[in-house]
Image: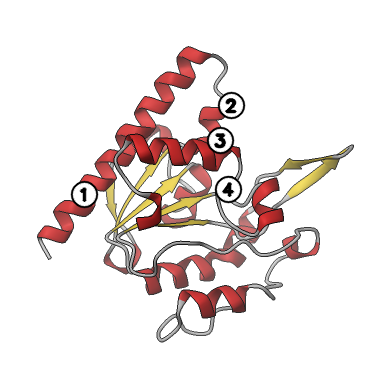
Amino acid sequence: MPAEAHGHSITALRKEARSCTACDLYKDATQTVFGEGPPGAHLILIGEQPGDKEDIEGAPFVGPAGALLDRALDEAGIDRNDVYVTNAVKHFKFIRKGKRRIHQKPNAEQMKACRPWLDAEIAVVKPKVIVCMGATAAQQLLGRTFRLTQHRGEFFAGPNAATLTATIHPSAILRAPDDESRHREMKQFVKDLKLAGRKVTTLRKSG
Ligand code: URA
């Protein structure tokens, strides 16, 4: 557990999180995948949990969903190097099917156990805007009754005086059934990211 976010750096939190056993997910995962990005980032993007590649490489959004995210950020005019990227849950949850490791959604207990790390990241980075990508991240910060379909793109008061919004998860775009819907979802995702970027600019101007 992170002791107190105050006075901690992201480097110190990442180191501490390496030995986290707050839920059972550490047992099968390769490693804790902590957030990455500049400590003073104005924008935090939050996904669900590391995937197969992230689990192996130890960094968030470096697999197929990450490639899509990079493309969307680029289209939205946001430099990923300026953004802090993390996940609601820091260990990969999966079941084995032959040689493949199939992603499993984290349960309420696992999300609760991981929440202090996310809170500590937000407290240290102090972003102006937080974007939750997908229902898991949104429900982690906005409660289990939050419905992405109803409130996507709206702005809420978030933790640590940040403004919070929620959009689709990049993996959902990858899973779109055909090119047309994939294209449509990507366009909307880019639009949501652009709006978040603009919100950062507005909030920075107003101090
Ligand atoms: N999906 C996520 O939610 N996070 C990652 O880091 C990779 C895929």
What amino acid is labelled 2 in the image? Arg
Q: Quadrant of residue 203?
A: bottom left
User: Tag 4 or tag 2, which sits nearer the N-term?
Assistant: 4
Figure check: 166 above or below 164: above
The disc, 1 or 3, on the residue closer to the chain's N-terminal end is: 3
Q: Is ligand 1 closer than 8 angstroms to the Cβ of mark 3?
A: yes
Marks 2 and 1: in contact by CB < 8 Å?
Answer: no
**Does residue 102 appear anywhere in the picture?**
yes
Q: Amino acid at mark 4?
A: Val
Q: In the image, which disc is placed on residue 175? A: 2
| Label 2 with label 3: CB-CB less than 8 Å | yes
Disc 3 target residue: 171
Q: Amino acid at mark 3?
A: Ser
Q: Which residue is mark 1?
A: 199
Left or right relative to 4: residue 163: left
Mark positioned earlier in the residue sequence (1 or 2): 2
Label ID, residue 59 = none
